[in-house]
Image (tube, rainbow, N blue to C red):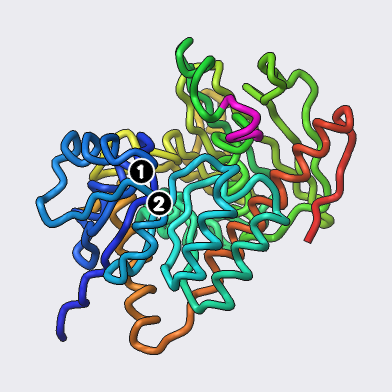
Amino acid sequence: MAAEAPIRFGILGCADIARKLSRAITLAPNAELHAVGSRSIDKAKSFAAANNYPPHVKIYGSYEAVLDDTDVDAVYIPLPTSLHVRWAVLAAQKKKHVLLEKPVAVNVSEFDKIVEACQSNGVQLMDGTMWMHHPRTAAMREFLVNSQLFGKLKTIQACFSFAADEDFLKNDIRVKPDLDALGALGDAGWYCVRSILWAADYELPKTAIALRGAVFNEAGVILACGASLRWEDGKVATFHCSFLANLTMDLTAIGTDGTLHINDFVIPYQEHEASYTTGSKSGFDDLVTCWSPKPSKHIIATELPQEVSMVREFSHLVGAIKKGGKPETKWPTRSRKTQLVLDAVKASVDKGFEAVEVGY
């Protein structure tokens, strides 16, 4: 079988996360870094030099120039969230496939404009939630759907926090209301909500209630918050996200017969290996001195880091479209559901921590 023709990527902006994605594009077997653009040509040149871009990569002094490059197949957009709708829509109109950093938009109405532009122009849309593409994620799914080992899902808990330094808390775009108004909810909270939806097989909860005790900066941007989600069948979930606490990336899903634990679900402890633990029909020994049976640890090795797997999957979908296929709709659908829950939690915060129905 002939190798896939590499998908040529352009990057809009020189955000820190673009360093990681530049490497991922370079390492992906079916992708190629073609161009980078910044509002400043000098910044674009410095970024390219600092990240050892090969000589063939085009360097542009505007985002428009990247989109006008006819050799660019797809764009990665790591711009501030408030700019997503403008540049993702324009990219789609220019027939560029869109790999969009999370959160995908300020709210779902803005994201719907992006989805409509991508659909009407026949281009692929995917968000940059990297852990979705790690082989560990598929292995954990097999446990969750095993009715004998896991049973029926009852509750989920997720936490993503990191202790941001003073410079971050004062200057990072994620604490600026005009750039990333959702703050920690949109950044760390996105991962928590996505993990909860993943565990629930993307069934939307009925209601969301933000937990009291949310922390805001002087501009009113969320620095830490939590929420409780409830489904019509009675299952529940809670999550906490924060810029103010030690690095933690925990996810627990509990069923009637089994439990799944992950302690590094967003970014694995190691690049080429990740683990999770499962317990089924857990109990105690006769004297209640220890667990029986004990939970088991599962280690999943991978040749490609999860961000490279994401680029590979996205490029594969783009390649299929170039051959006459249709865009894969599951990715924007998952993005939209995640955004819907974020919107409901934010609305609950704004309404004094009242229960808010999750939209559709």
**In the image, is residue 181 part of the stretch drawn in magenta?**
yes
Q: Earlier in the sequence, mark 1 or mark 2?
A: 1
User: Residue 15: percent from the left, percent from the top?
Assistant: 38, 37
Give the left or right position of residue 192, taking residue 1 as reference.
right
Q: From which residue to which does the magenta span run?
A: 175-182
Residue type for callout 1: Ser
Q: Secondary structure at mark 1?
A: loop
Q: Residue at x 49, y 65 (%)?
A: 125
* Residue 106: mark in rendering: none
For residue 33, above or below residue 158: below
Q: Residue at x 88, y 32 (%)?
A: 351
Residue type for callout 2: Tyr
Residue assigned mark 2: 63
**Mark 2 neighbour density, 10 Å: few (under 14) some (14–19) many (20 or more):** many
Give the left or right position of residue 180, taking residue 63 as reference.
right
User: Are the residues tagged 1 and 2 within 8 Å (C-beta)?
Assistant: yes
**Residue 359 location, quadrant:** bottom right
User: Residue 193: percent from the left, percent from the top?
Assistant: 62, 44
